[in-house]
Amino acid sequence: MRTEFDLIIVGGGPTGAAAGVFTARYGFDTLVLDRGRSSLRRIAHLENYLGFPGGIDIETFYELAHAHAEQSGCEVVGDLAEAVERTEDGFRVRTDEGRVLHTKRVLAASKYDTGHLEGLDDDLFTTKHYNGEAYEILDQKVIGDDGRTNVDGLYVAGSLAKAGSQALTNAGHGATVGLTIIEDDRRDRGFPNELAAAYHDWVVVEGGYGGDDWEQNLHDQFDDALPEETNLSEREIDELRSEFVDEHRAWQITPGEKERRRVEGYRKLAARLDANLLLEQLDDDHVLQRARQIDAERNLRSK
Ligand SMILES: Cc1cc2nc3c(=O)[nH]c(=O)nc-3n(C[C@H](O)[C@H](O)[C@H](O)COP(=O)(O)OP(=O)(O)OC[C@H]3O[C@@H](n4cnc5c(N)ncnc54)[C@H](O)[C@@H]3O)c2cc1C
């Protein structure tokens, strides 16, 4: 297994998996460590996560969330982060199974567990008393809404950052913090502030954007956003401008590519959801009713 990453996410629940989908698609070498106490696994049946009208059992949801993170490029490993330590150019993460990993950035999405963050910075924690006992908890004063903390390169997301107590709000916050991490990387690489923040991960059918002046507008937009004084060389500015234009070009796909992705989406879903298992969950009447429907639709088409 590799030991160097751009980002290590501690926790592969809804928060961490959602963050990883964005950072890995951006091109970050993203590792998700996932083991230990989980809130998700305590849910009897997840009934209010958007996209599953009849709710979804936790095993299937977890499998799909991890498959999505992996498909996006994340490496997902069932190991526990025990200690996160500062290094000259980032962090060293030690795990329960003896791994010693290096990363530029760390995202804590571990809901119940903050032990691995102890020792990083005393100001990260504050003392709370409960039933006469003293507890060290993350101090919300040093965590921004976007997940940045007082420790450069350390981010916190989900319930740890007080982003609600529902799987969907936590996943949404994970995605938000993933985008914050992308913004910070773009700024570090020299993108002007407003363009560093203007990253979008989406596609449209070609023609949805564009037109004759579109590329010229993008060039102008880039140049207008450049500060008057910059440490970047002409070559670096040209490279960033090209990257900015290319990433906008990549938003557009052909109708054929749209269709290919539609079919691929179904294939991936079918591969994960065993069709026989699905059928077993449905009673015979359901299956027969659907078979008659398909038959009727076929007859109609052949007329
Ligand atoms: C009893 C109960 C019922 C609930 N019912 C619902 C519901 O019906 N609908 C709803 O929307 N929400 C429900 N919730 C809330 C939901 O579970 C949480 O909002 C959601 O799971 C939080 O996601 P998360 O990724 O932040 O944390 P978690 O789901 O807890 O995921 C964190 C992950 O991090 C891993 N981890 C922890 N520490 C480490 C470490 N040191 N190293 C590596 N990995 C680590 C854990 O194994 C876990 O997989 C319920 C919660 C509880 C407790």
Image (cartoon, rainbow, N blue to C red):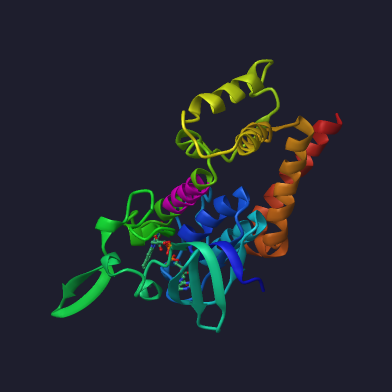
The reply, left or right, for residue 156 in relation to residue 97 is left
Quadrant in the rendering for residue 287:
bottom right
Q: How many marks?
A: 0
Q: Position of residue 100 (x, y in %)?
A: 55, 78
Camera-side residue: 204 or 122? 122
Q: Position of residue 197 (x, y in %)?
A: 47, 39
Position above or below: 198 against 83: above
Residue 60 seen from this side: no
Camera-side residue: 186 or 71? 186
Residue 52 seen from this side: yes
Q: Position of residue 204 (x, y in %)?
A: 65, 31
Residue extending farthest left? 132
Q: Residue at x 51, y 39 (%)?
A: 231
Q: Quadrant of the C terminus?
A: top right
Q: Residue at x 50, y 73 (%)?
A: 93
Q: Quadrant of the N terminus?
A: bottom right
Q: Residue at x 50, y 30 (%)?
A: 226
Position above or below: 293 against 205: below
Camera-side residue: 238 or 143? 238
Q: Main secondary structure of the magenta part?
A: helix
Q: Quadrant of ligand 1?
A: bottom left
Residue 174 lies in magenta, yes or no?
A: yes
| Highlighted range, magenta | 173-185
Position above or below: 180 against 58: above
The reply, left or right, for residue 142 in relation to residue 297 is left
Quadrant in the rendering for residue 244:
top right
Q: Position of residue 181 (x, y in %)?
A: 48, 51
Residue extending farthest right? 302
Quadrant in the rendering for residue 300:
top right
Residue extending farthest top? 212
